[in-house]
Image (cartoon, rainbow, N blue to C red):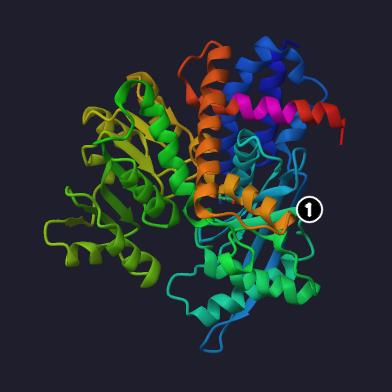
Amino acid sequence: MSVRDRVEEIYKQVLDRNAGEPEFHQAVAEVFESLRVVVDVQPEYADAGLIDRLCEPERQIIFRVPWTADNGQVHVNRGFRVQYSSVLGPYKGGLRFHPSVNLGIVKFLGFEQIFKNALTGLPIGGGKGGSDFDPKGRSDAEIMRFCQSFMTELHRHVGEYTDVPAGDIGVGGREIGYLFGQYKRLTNSYESGVLTGKGITWGGSQVRREATGYGVAYFVAEMLKASRNGLADKKVVVSGSGNVAIYAIEKVQQLGGIPIACSDSSGYVVDEKGIDLDLLKEIKEVRRGRISEYADKVQHATFVESGSIWDVPCDVALPCATQNELGEDGAKALVKNGVIAVAEGANMPTTPQGIQVFRSAGISFAPGKAANAGGVATSALEMQQNASRDSWSFEYTDERLAAIMRGIHQRTIDTADQYGLKGDYVHGANIAGFVKVANAMISLGVI
Ligand code: GLU
């Protein structure tokens, strides 16, 4: 059997074995596109069940999460933790609380996380978790009871040297606090390194809250550096208005760009004078309100309820909301309006058809694995600080993050170059991540 046939056989097996999980299939399909290129040059990577093992999570945990609402009603949600690969370090990856969460979503996110974490150059494996719990409209007390119940089961499976969760959609500082409190109570130990994204006064790291968004901005500035004078005066459209979007907007502004639009699930706002960040933070971080409130407060801004944010003309697009939010039509609209670079702040926000549109048009396109790795990289810096019982300054941590993002950018383009795919960030990120994990797997034997 030829090496290519062997890869196709593994790919088919993965799809058959994981039926009904379209997002997981999509994430695997994207990586296999790059693996075909790798095994042509290095056929040994198709041996020893290496790819087969990499596609199968080391462990998948599913559990019941019962909790009581303020009105006394008992709800039952489903909790997940997929411990995908620990070859480079303890499993590392966020928890997502959103009604769309199911095993397939957690597996896609965990699979992506393996390569993303490898790309950071830091010693972290890949994992992901979450629940189909919907935090929208829930009181603080309900969120606390849910988090406590979730951790009552999860605590058996995590630990500083085993698995270190953090936040993702629906899980921020408040939730990490309740989760950490319950872990501390159950284990009777102050094990700071078991979770990242903690508050600054109780073991957290400066810049962790900002890190994913800042990292995306650093990455895209690097993409534009050679030919286009960085982000200076570029019009930037950022989808979403959660943690990633807010801090991408902040750093884009600091680097001289002009973020002109952002969104939530109810619609999008356009402010050609540049998004007023204090107002956006007040609406989203303090009041947990809707994006339409922005246009109520800012006279010259417009709120669009239906339609696509990708119709807003811009130089740079940063999809920072969720998976598959930027499809073929959105990509075509961006290309037609003259976009020059796209970088993913969310995980897999662009569909394969959307990526194809950017590729054919020769638009610089950076996948989330590379562009949004700043969040998890800073989590690894938080782990370093916890392990050494130290805490670093904001400036020092931000410099470390910027250097890590420059490193990821360089590694990605160098790898693409090396495999004859100049300028292809998608292949560059997949291959660089894969080769690092694969080499470590070979060293550790069949486990
Ligand atoms: N959820 C984030 C991601 O998608 C961060 C994970 C972490 O900090 O562990 O990479």
Report the front residue among 20 and 426: 426
The residue at the point 33 percent across, 20 percent down is 227
The residue at the point 29 percent across, 43 percent down is 237
Left or right of 229, for residue 138: right
Location of the N terminus by quadrant is: top right
Q: Position of residue 180 (x, y in %)?
A: 66, 69
Is residue 20 something one can see in this rendering?
Answer: no
Q: Is mark 1 within 8 Å of ligand 1?
A: no
The correct choice, above or below, for 277 with respect to 404 in the image is below
Magenta stretch prevailing secondary structure: helix
Q: Which residue is tagged 1?
A: 162
Report the front residue among 108 and 417: 417
Corner quadrant of residue 108: top right
Q: Position of residue 104 (x, y in %)?
A: 60, 48
Q: Amino acid at mark 1?
A: Thr
Q: Which stretch appears magenta?
A: 431-438
Queried whether the magenta region covers residue 4, the answer comes back as no
SS assignment at label 1: loop
Report the front residue among 351 and 45: 45
Corner quadrant of residue 179: bottom right
Q: Position of residue 20 (x, y in %)?
A: 59, 45
Decide: few, some or many residues near mark 1? Use Cα within 10 Å; few <14, some 14-19, many ≥20: some
The residue at the point 44 percent across, 70 percent down is 136
